[in-house]
Structures are given as C-alpha cells and as structure tokens.
Amino acid sequence: MEISIVVPLFNEEESLPELVEWINRVLDSHFKLYEIVLIDDGSTDRSWPVIRQLKKEYPHISAVRFQRNYGKSAALNLGFREASGEVIITLDADLQDNPDEIPHLYKMIREEGFDLVSGWKKKRHDPITKTLPSKFFNTTTRLISGIRLHDFNSGIKAYHRTVVKNIEVYGEMHRYIPVIAHHAGFSKIGEKVVNHMPRKYGQTKFGFERIIRGFLDLLSISFVGKFSQRPMHFFGSIGTVLILGGFGVLSYLSYLKIALDISGIADRPSFYLGFLLLILGVQLFIAGFLAEMISRSAPNRNQYNVADRL
C-alpha cells in the first residue's frame, strides 16, 4: 500500500461527502494503491450513515466507529493502527485541510527522507479565540521541546509508517505528536506551508478547557519522554541538591553554635530552612527510588524502537 489517509471525525455529516470525493480524486490521479481510513469518534449526528453510503461509492474506504466520543487522540491512535500504507497522512474532516497538499507531503516523506512533516497554516481562517491560544502553545512547545515547528497541532500531517507504528497517542496528546515522535527517536521532522480553508460546515470543536489540559499534557510528554526509563535521574538529582543544601545550612549553624558559642540558633529561620531542605530532599530521593523500582518492573521496560535490521 503506497499511502493511507486517516481522517478522525466527530459530527461532520455535512462535510464528509465533499471531503471524501476530494480526497479520492487526488489519490486516484497520483497513486495506484491507497486507502482512506475514517474513524468516527462517536458522532451523534448522521455521520455514520453517511460513511456507510460513501463506502458503497468508494471501495477504498475503511471505517471504524467508536461507541462513544473518546477524543481526537484516541481516533488518531486507532487510525494509525488500522493504516497499512508506507506513508500515512492525516486530515481533519471539517474541510479546512486541503487534500491537494497530499502529493507534495507524500514526496517529502518518500523522496526527501522526512520521518514526519507537519502542515503550517501560515494564514489561518479561524477566530482570534482559537488563533491566540494556538500561538501561545506553539511558542511554549518550541521552547520546551526544542523542535522548530510553527504549528504543532495542525490536523494535516504526513508520517513514515515506522513513526505511527512506534508511538502511542492518548489524552489530548494529538497536538504534540511531533514531540512524541522526537522522544521516540525520529529526528527528521519538517514542515510545509499549507493552504488553510475557511470552515464551510458546522462549528469548531475547540474549547478553552483544552488549554489547561493541553499544557499539562505537554509537561507530561516532556517528563515521560526524558525520564520514563530513568526517573531516579530526575528525582534523585533534585533531592541530592536539596539534601546538600540543607546539610550545608545546618552545618553552618552547628559551627556557629559549637565553635563560636552563639546562642539562639534554633530560633533562626535558617534553622527551619535547613531541616525543610533535608526533609524535601529525602522525600524526593525516596520518590525517585520508588519510581525506579516501578519502572524496572514495568512489562515494557526493555522495549525500544528498532530503526533497521539486517
């Protein structure tokens, strides 16, 4: 299979016929072996009956419907498992992602050797309530991850098959897939300026509650990606610094008391600070030790992504 198009969707009955016809037209003119994978994330409108009708018209469609709404990350994760193409391209179902971008994205993966290519909606047709939070998170993600992308959460992305088969997407982490892929060892990540279309049907699914969840997911990805196999390096390092700091403060106060016979040492704020640093340091050290024990007993502790095999 040359290419798989994965489309997660939720309540997009109006846009689906036009989207599928457009995707099929582009694929039919550029590829011989292709598939369109539709993941219905528990739609409550007529999206599934529409998909069933489209399946009769377009034999290259495969589709899965969730019993309830699990979120875009779950839909994408299942779509990645279902896809069989050498290149997997994702599109949102609201017609704001342009299927005409597919051939160029495919070439960037197959001919230019990228692991992942993210679409950059340089000129967006979205309300300011959506664009401002997006700019904030893109800037924050660039600073934390070190990945130089302008649009991490773009719905249109292209992946080499090995990428989607070696990552797991859950929670709200679909917006940080490039970060997940980077932590999995896929370093050749690029972007392409894409044509962003105005919304034609329905309403945006964006909500302000996603801002907090998205930020927490970013912190989680960054921590797990760096320290999931060695949590003691994180907790133990901080704990050691605190323990040494507390020991240093208490040693200095002991010197004042014993060598210089200064009274009232126990009444000084530094006395309580020293003990606080010691206690916090020991607790973090123990937390790191326990996390290390849990990590070592995890069933996937020795599972690693293999890049090649002879």
Image (spheres, helix red, strand yellow):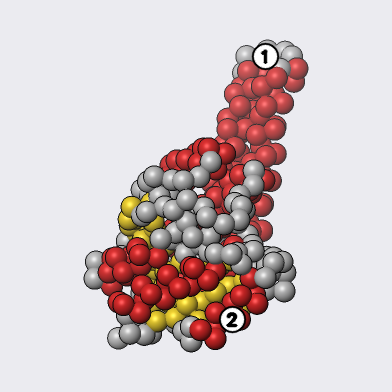
Please tell me the numbered disc located at residue 53.
2
As drawn, 49 above or below 235: below
Q: Position of residue 173 (x, y in %)?
A: 56, 58
Q: Amino acid at mark 2?
A: Gln
Query: In the image, is 44 to the left or to the right of 13?
Result: right
- Badge 1 is on which residue? 261
Q: Position of residue 225 (x, y in %)?
A: 50, 58
Callout 2 crowding tier (Cα within 10 Å): few <14, some 14–19, many ≥20: few
Callout 1 crowding tier (Cα within 10 Å): few <14, some 14–19, many ≥20: few
Q: Quadrant of the N terminus?
A: bottom left
The local secondary structure at tag 2 comes to helix
Distance from the alpha carbon under mark 2 to that under mark 1: 90 Å
The residue closer to the viewer here, 87 or 179, is: 87
Q: Nearer the viewer, mark 2 or mark 1?
A: 2
Q: Position of residue 12 (x, y in %)?
A: 60, 64
Query: In the image, is 302 to the left or to the right of 190?
Result: right
Q: Position of residue 39 (x, y in %)?
A: 58, 73
Residue at image location 61% in from the left, 27% down from the top:
249
The local secondary structure at tag 1 comes to loop
Inspect this view and state whether residue 82 appears. no
